Amino acid sequence: MVKGAVLYNFFEPLKVESVQLKAPRADEVVVKMAASGVCHSDLSVQQAKLPIPPPVILGHEGAGIVEEVGKGVSDLKPGDHVVLAWVQTCGKCHYCVLGQEHLCDSAIKAMMAGEEQVFEKDGVGIARMAGVASFAERTVVRASACIKIPDEVPLDKACLVGCGVMTGVGAAINTAKVRPGQTVAVFGCGGVGLNVIQGAALCGASRIIAVDLVDQKLKWAKDFGATDVVNGKQVSDVPDAIRGLTDGVGVDYAFEVIGVPEIITQAFLSVKRGGKAVVVGVPGFDQFVSIPGAALPLEEKSVIGSLYGSGSMRRDMPKLIELYMQKKLKLDELISRRIKLDQVNEAFEAMQTGEVARSVIIY
Ligand SMILES: [Zn+2]
Ligand SMILES: [Zn+2]
């Protein structure tokens, strides 16, 4: 039996209880969780915005230690330290062959359907979110979800690379490919937004304008490399304010890291001619985004999406860990609270009030 946080019904608190864990299949491994971040997408599942059918154990930003491997697994062994990736690549589909592993057919399916039910309670199967389920003391994942990291890396920090850091830093480095001297605005300075900011700083952006409604988050934004901050409550027109900070032209890239259609529109209006709005936040499945059509050809502006930092997990996650070990990437500063699994519902509340960058569950 393992303790896990189960979502039984949308909009209800998670229930922390003992469940059974199935044995790993040939291509799977058992991971003893060390730590898991609480990400906004976990909340989105609870609120039916990312409608993974319950019952499901949430959590997709985990790190831990391999405990047992299925008989077909040759590249992992018990004792290996791993970060869990919520995209498990098949290596064979159209996208994997093209080198876009984060868009892998099987990964998208796993993400949305909660995938196989590796947990069970009273004969009822319980799914694992995004092939991970890091809100459980132990979980069974595909071997391809495990990204090996050196033993000396603290797992309570490493877990953050599993979602927020990869998503945010990758959006700047891989999706946008920000170049030295370019200008950037970031709408939304939570756990992922702060990582877009530090990603843009790593790329050498000359101006990084952070936009949020919460002063505390704007303060964090400065710690992560923002050169300017705009509190959306204090200006009448945010795109105008951004143009005002960039000699009237606007930014090369405006990242939207909230998932609100109106803010995506604002991001689009904030970029200069030839600029790109990069959508990282996930709007509801039934929502549409409105942008002025003429600006697409006449101003050569575009809107692009970014999933999981357009990353190749095997290539990028070890790199991010290496940057952290060299003190070039901030992870410690992302952790606002360290909590126990039982406090996961409180972490959801804290996220909604904007009090935290990340709560991290320590097992
Ligand atoms: Zn996440
Ligand atoms: Zn694939």
Image (cartoon, rainbow, N blue to C red):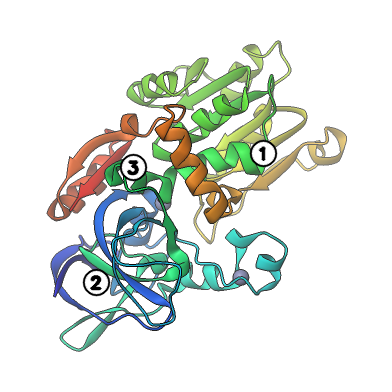
Which x, y percent locates residue 254? Answer: 62, 32
Q: Residue furthest right?
A: 298
Q: Which mark is residue 176?
A: 1
Q: Count numbered badges in the picture.
A: 3
Which x, y percent locates residue 263? Answer: 55, 37
- In primary-sequence order, the first of circles 2 and 3 is 2
Label 2 residue SS: loop
24 versus 194 height, above or below = below
Type of the residue with mark 1? Ala
Would you say the residues marked 2 and 1 are in contact, meaning their CB atoms lie under 8 Å apart?
A: no
Gap in Å between the C-alphas at discs 2 and 3?
Answer: 35 Å
Q: What residue does disc 2 label?
A: 8
Type of the residue with mark 2? Tyr
Label 3 residue SS: loop
Residue appearing at x 42%, y 66% in the figure: 130
Mark 2 is surrounded, within 10 Å at the Cα level, by few (under 14), some (14 to 19) or many (20 or more) other residues, namely: some
Q: Residue furthest bottom?
A: 123
Mark 3 is surrounded, within 10 Å at the Cα level, by few (under 14), some (14 to 19) or many (20 or more) other residues, namely: some
Which x, y percent locates residue 315? Answer: 57, 51
The N terminus, quarter of image: bottom left
Observer-side mark, 3 or 1, equals 3
Q: What residue does disc 3 label?
A: 153
Type of the residue with mark 3? Val
- In primary-sequence order, the first of circles 3 and 1 is 3
28 versus 171 height, above or below = below
Closest to the observer: 98 or 208?
Answer: 98
- In primary-sequence order, the first of circles 2 and 1 is 2
Residue appearing at x 62%, y 22% in the figure: 204
Left or right of residue 193: residue 264: right
| Ligand 2's quadrant | bottom right
Residue appearing at x 55%, y 45% in the figure: 280
